[in-house]
Amino acid sequence: MPAHYKRGSEILDSRPIGIFDSGVGGLTIASEVMKILPNETIIYFGDTARVPYGSKSKETVTKYSRQMVNFLKDSGVKAIVAACNTVCANSLDKLLEEFDIPIIDVLNPGVSSCLDATRNNVVGVIGTEGTIKSGAYEKALKAAKPGIIVYSKACPLFVPLSEEGWTSNSVANITTEIYLQELIDKEIDSLLLGCTHYPLLIECISRVVGGITIINSAVSVAGSLKEFLTENNMLSESRESPEHEFYVSDDTVKFRRTCKSVFGRDFTATQIDIEKFI
Ligand code: DGL
């Protein structure tokens, strides 16, 4: 069956969806996509050799993102989820300018969920240094709701902790307490996780913030992908269960361990040379 075929007036598109991140963070998005789009096949790339992106310059993040988009395009995907806030905050405009493939961002869905959640209009945003420095969340939140008060905080150690699988031990707990106390003191009622790695630390974060509403935008990102595919007649209706593929730029062992804890099952992963995709 061809990738695109017609049934009645509908166009069905069985090509895979590409998802990329600097490492394991985008798996939190892939997991939600699998839940609400069970017929879709995912090709995932995690740039584990070059993580973290959060401390790198805009130019470097753009160069790396370009390579990942090229890899996924060459793999024949129909749309790409840029499952990395650092990329969306710094390089999305450039990617949209350079590529004609649809690219779904992770920033706007998080902003909408945060606006829906807040009651006192005092919110916290946490993310990488690159995301917080860009001011992208603060700008988007204030543009949508001018009276909102936004406190932002970079939490760079959350990324290596997640990559290491140290998501609920004493080091993760104390790090979370140190990072988040100042936001709690500002009486925020909602905390937006502006990095796709952070939901991996949800246990620690929930314990530390108590009654504050945590916004994990993975659910809304998956929703916006579904909406996009539906509106553009690009959904796959294949009855066969999808065979997802996972690629990384470094050793696969730690990546597969995180896959197992996120999906509750084993997946194989393949190491590739991302530098070849200029
Ligand atoms: N997961 C990414 C994000 O959402 C990047 C983290 C990093 O590599 O620093 O920002």
Image (tube, grey):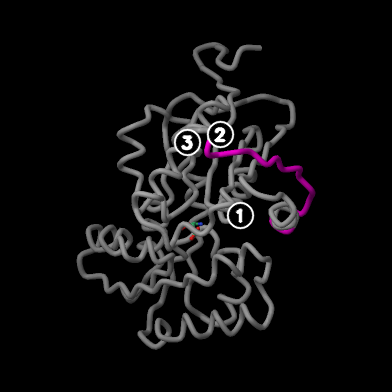
Indicate the amino acid at tag 3. Answer: Val
Earlier sequence position, callout 2 versus callout 3: 2
Earlier sequence position, callout 3 versus callout 1: 1
Image: magenta residue range: 261-275
| Closer to the eye: label 2 or 3 | 3
- Sort mark 3 into few (<14), some (14-19) or many (20+) by Cα contacts within 10 Å: many
SS at mark 1 in the image: loop
Quadrant for residue 122, please give it: bottom left
SS at mark 3 in the image: helix
Instruction: Report how far apart the C-alphas of labels 1 and 2 lie in the structure.
Output: 17 Å
Q: Which residue is mark 2?
A: 17
Magenta span contains residue 23? no
Indicate the amino acid at tag 2. Answer: Ile
Measuring 37% from the left and 30% from the top, which residue is drawn there? 99
Q: Position of residue 255 (x, y in %)?
A: 69, 53
Q: Which residue is mark 1?
A: 24
Q: Position of residue 149 (x, y in %)?
A: 27, 74
Q: Position of residue 222 (x, y in %)?
A: 52, 46
Q: Who is closer to the viewer here, 123 or 135? A: 135
Quadrant for residue 113, please give it: bottom left
Q: Which residue is mark 3?
A: 69
Measuring 55% from the left and 24% from the top, which residue is drawn there? 76
SS at mark 2 in the image: strand
State whether label 2 is within 8 Å of ligand 1.
Answer: no
Q: Position of residue 78 (x, y in %)?
A: 51, 27
Earlier sequence position, callout 1 versus callout 2: 2
Instruction: Report how far apart the C-alphas of labels 2 and 3 lie in the structure.
Output: 12 Å
